[in-house]
Image (tube, rainbow, N blue to C red):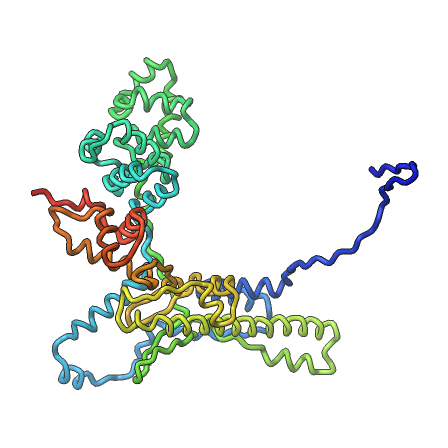
């Protein structure tokens, strides 16, 4: 509300209009869809094209996927005599390369222990508490149960039992519900707590009458708790919905098979060339019949407007997919050229590479690079890799930047060369790396060691 002061020689507030220019980025529906197409994985792109084919009669799709088992009559006769005459012994190196390639087709799901360690890192706890949690998780089996007592862990780590119990209680709040239990009774109680059913009859029976329940002494439970058989039956039905082996929810996950968007080939000159794997992308084109109808003077105007609308949509889709493929190819070729030492020398030779670096070099913004590399795979003679695998941060060492991949190799090599009876602690690894000019924190070593699926020193130690 404005107040007007009528006194002379005093400023008076007056309503006024002010014009401002504000810049806002508003994505058009087509631009939004183009970004979405860029983000799609190969199977998702195929699904999109099938949907567009159903919705747009002007689009024709030709699937180029070669069947795994062509009809017998189409198989050419081959003379295998020269093959067997030339090489009767199997090429072990080639067989190993093929085996590694087949294994790389599978994206392995994380183990239960890896998942629990990831959740542990998300908590604000001390180094000492983290070490306790690491030991507890290392002793949780694939079913989700803690295989040793807290007393044993306390003795092994020279810690108080209360400290072990505290971290175990934290881990028992992790996913999946019931993990970290020491027996079936505790496992069921943890799951009922997670469901906020601590006041339920089921919780009371499991907590106080589990042995009777386990041994099916139902009459005793009914009599002591003054409940009806129907109520006990309802409790059994409630408990049947719980998981007696919660760890299997993660350890039994099936591997995911991937389709590569790109193929890497090596020329005779030793150069690495990236090609699009168009074999799995159906060819799309505009149906010529509808173009003739559009030009035909006898075609009704309403029909022409419909054809023109679908023609515009179809041509835009073809252009958007072409742009997607060119963007992926451009980024992938730069990555391969930049990381050529990796393809020539193998693991441990990745150079530090960031989104900002590649964005600056090829003239695309970081968000475009990020969308492009996510979920996109390249097939190489050494296996199939996701494009983002070639991006790695750097650490300082001997006046130059060292990639995290190289650092992991160094950690792995140090541990392989250690005395099994006196394995290196994470701090000792830090000291040895420092002696080589690589300065990193102990927690960083712990993180990379876990990512390498290497146990902590006290679990690697071989008894005398």
Q: Is residue 252 visible?
A: no
Residue shown at the point (46%, 74%) measured from the top left = 330
- Residue 334: quadrant of the picture: bottom left
Residue shown at the point (34%, 75%) measured from the top left = 70
In the image shown, does 91 or 22 lie closer to the viewer? 22
In the image shown, does 405 or 402 lie closer to the viewer? 402
Residue shown at the point (42%, 27%) measured from the top left = 197
Quadrant including the C terminus = top left
Residue 407 in the image: state x and y as whole percent.
28, 58
Q: Can residue 357 be seen in this view?
A: yes
Residue 91 in the image: state x and y as whole percent.
16, 75
Residue shown at the point (42%, 65%) measured from the top left = 376
92 to the left or right of 105:
left
In the image shown, does 421 or 286 lie closer to the viewer? 421
What count of labels does the image hold? 0
Residue 404 in the image: state x and y as whole percent.
32, 59
**Vertical side of 119 occupied by 304: above or below:** below
**Vertical side of 317 occupied by 200: above or below:** above
In the image shown, does 110 or 169 lie closer to the viewer? 169
Quadrant including the N terminus = top right
| Residue found at the far front of this picture | 9
């Amino acid at each position: 509300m404005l107040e007007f002061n009528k006194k002379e020689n005093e400023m008076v507030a007056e309503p006024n209009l002010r014009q401002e220019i504000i810049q806002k980025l508003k994505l058009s529906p087509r631009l939004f869809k183009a970004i979405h197409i860029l983000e799609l994985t190969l199977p998702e792109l195929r699904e999109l094209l099938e949907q567009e084919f159903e919705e747009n009669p002007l689009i024709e799709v030709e699937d180029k996927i070669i069947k795994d088992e062509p009809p017998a009559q189409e198989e050419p006769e081959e003379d295998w005599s020269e093959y067997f005459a030339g090489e009767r012994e199997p090429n072990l190196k080639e067989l190993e390369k093929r085996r590694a390639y087949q294994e790389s087709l599978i994206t392995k799901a994380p183990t239960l222990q890896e998942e629990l360690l990831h959740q542990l890192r998300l908590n604000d706890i001390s180094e000492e508490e983290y070490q306790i949690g690491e030991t507890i998780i290392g002793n949780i089996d694939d079913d989700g149960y803690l295989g040793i007592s807290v007393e044993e862990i306390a003795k092994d780590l020279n810690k108080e039992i209360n400290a072990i119990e505290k971290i175990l209680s934290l881990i028992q709040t992790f996913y999946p519900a019931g993990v970290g239990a020491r027996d079936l009774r505790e496992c069921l109680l943890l799951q009922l707590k997670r469901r906020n059913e601590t006041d339920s009859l089921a919780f009371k029976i499991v907590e106080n009458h589990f042995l009777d329940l386990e041994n099916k002494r139902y009459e005793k439970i009914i009599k002591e708790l003054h409940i009806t058989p129907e109520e006990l039956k309802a409790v059994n039905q409630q408990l049947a919905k719980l998981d007696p082996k919660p760890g299997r929810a993660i350890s039994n996950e099936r591997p995911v098979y991937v389709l590569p968007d790109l193929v890497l080939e090596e020329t005779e000159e030793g150069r690495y060339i990236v090609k699009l794997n168009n074999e799995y992308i159906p060819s799309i084109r505009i149906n010529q019949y509808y173009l003739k109808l559009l030009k035909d003077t006898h075609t009704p105007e309403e029909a022409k407007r419909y054809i023109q609308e679908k023609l515009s949509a179809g041509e835009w889709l073809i252009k958007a997919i072409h742009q997607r493929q060119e963007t992926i190819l451009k980024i992938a070729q730069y990555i391969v050229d930049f990381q050529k030492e990796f393809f020539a020398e193998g693991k441990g030779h990745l150079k530090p590479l960031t989104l900002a670096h590649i964005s600056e070099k090829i003239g695309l913004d970081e968000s475009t690079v990020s969308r492009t590399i996510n979920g996109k795979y390249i097939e190489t003679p050494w296996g199939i890799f996701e494009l983002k695998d070639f991006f790695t941060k750097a650490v300082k060492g001997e006046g130059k930047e060292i990639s995290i991949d190289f650092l992991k190799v160094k950690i792995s090599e140090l541990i392989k060369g250690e005395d099994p009876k006196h394995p290196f602690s994470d701090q000792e690894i830090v000291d040895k790396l420092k002696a080589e000019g690589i300065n990193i924190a102990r927690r960083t070593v712990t993180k990379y060691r876990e990512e390498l699926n290497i146990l902590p020193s006290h679990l690697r130690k071989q008894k005398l």
